[in-house]
Image (spheres, rainbow, N blue to C red):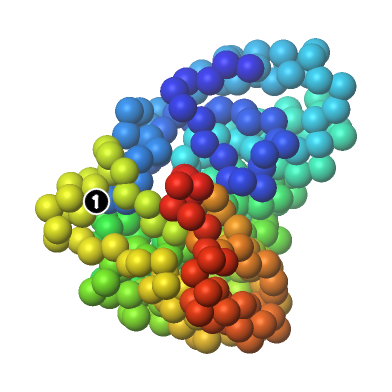
Amino acid sequence: MRYIGDIYRPPSEAYSLLVQITVGCTHNKCAFCTMYKNKQFRLRDPKEVIEDLDWARAHYRRVDRMFLCDGDALALKNSKLLFYLDYITEHFPECERITTYGRATAVMKKTDEELRELKEHGLDMVYLGAESGSQKVLDMMNKGETREDLIKGVQRLEAAGIKTSVTFISGLGGTEYWEEHAIESGKMITEMNASYVSLLTLMVQPPAPLYDEYVAGRFKMLKAEEVLAETCLLLQHAKPAKSCVFRSNHASNYVSLRGNIPEDNEAMIAALKRCMEDRGLLKDDRFRML
């Protein structure tokens, strides 16, 4: 397999075959993100992608899962996506799941029929970074998407039968907007009715634009106990109509949480409060990473 630049994947895709069909991210301007700063978005040559898939077929007896990279492969026209999905289905009949990253803006450019086509041709799940339910925080972080588009994008994917795994970032509102970030993110989870929701915790590193704001003192990060209090507040407002798998077990998190919302909210809040009372239960900063 050949890859252009650094490759990123969700933690749950650790055992998936990573197939790079695009390079970089269509937006690539989020203030907190370091992932694709050394890449300019472009499509990979389909011939190269097929060569990679053929190489994988020749070298791997089984490929149970595939993840389509880079940051916004869903931005491809449906005709191009369907070409890859059909090729995978034909040459990897054992493949049980095909997933990708996608921005809400890419979802909103597709019709409901196009989304259903993607599902029918094998796209099982889209990982979507909402980051925050607060429009103020989204604007501050230059997310380039509206709260309404994020909610509608997830709802439309789910309605088409494509599962969504939505990520929020604890601490993204800083000390100034932490309450709004928590409450509005909880409300967004309620409205989205996603299949999966996960939290990672903000870690500011260069070359993310937010790093300069942090060093200059214009952005103040939450302490560990404050992050946990924020998560408690988020869970208090996260009440989706259907059960949603919730995970806060990313390497960046201070506390690992596993449960379903809303039914496990109270148990998870209780666990967070125990950790707030006993700092020894928190992950040491030395072992946190993106």
Say which quarter of the image contains residue 149.
bottom left
Q: What secondary structure is marked by label 1?
A: helix
Q: Is residue 289 visible?
A: yes
Residue 87 to residue 280: above or below? above
On the image, the x and y values in percent for residue 71 come to 47, 40
10 Å crowding of disc 1: few (<14), some (14-19), many (20+): many
Vertical comparison of 56 with 243: above or below? above
Q: Residue at x 44, y 52 (%)?
A: 285
From the viewer's perspective, is 12 left or right of 284? right
Give the vertical position of 181 relative to 109 (above or below): below
- Determine the residue positioned at 33% across, 79% down: 180
Does residue 142 appear left or right of residue 107 in this picture? left
Answer left or right for 213 relative to 221. Answer: left
Looking at the rendered image, the quarter that the N terminus falls into is: top right
Q: Residue at image x 17%, y 50%?
A: 215
How many marks are shown on the rendered structure? 1
- Residue 43 in sight from this viewpoint: no
**Kind of residue indicated by mark 1:** Leu
* 90, 173: nearer the viewer: 173
Q: 40 or 272: which is nearer to us? A: 272
Which image quarter: residue 260?
Answer: bottom right
Name the residue at 27% across, 58% down: 141
Mark 1 lies on residue: 210
x then y, percent, for residue 70: 50, 35
Name the spot of residue 131 as percent of width and height, x first: 42, 61
Front in this rendered view, residue 283 or 54: 283
Q: Position of residue 45 (x, y in %)?
A: 51, 18
Say which quarter of the image contains residue 206.
top left
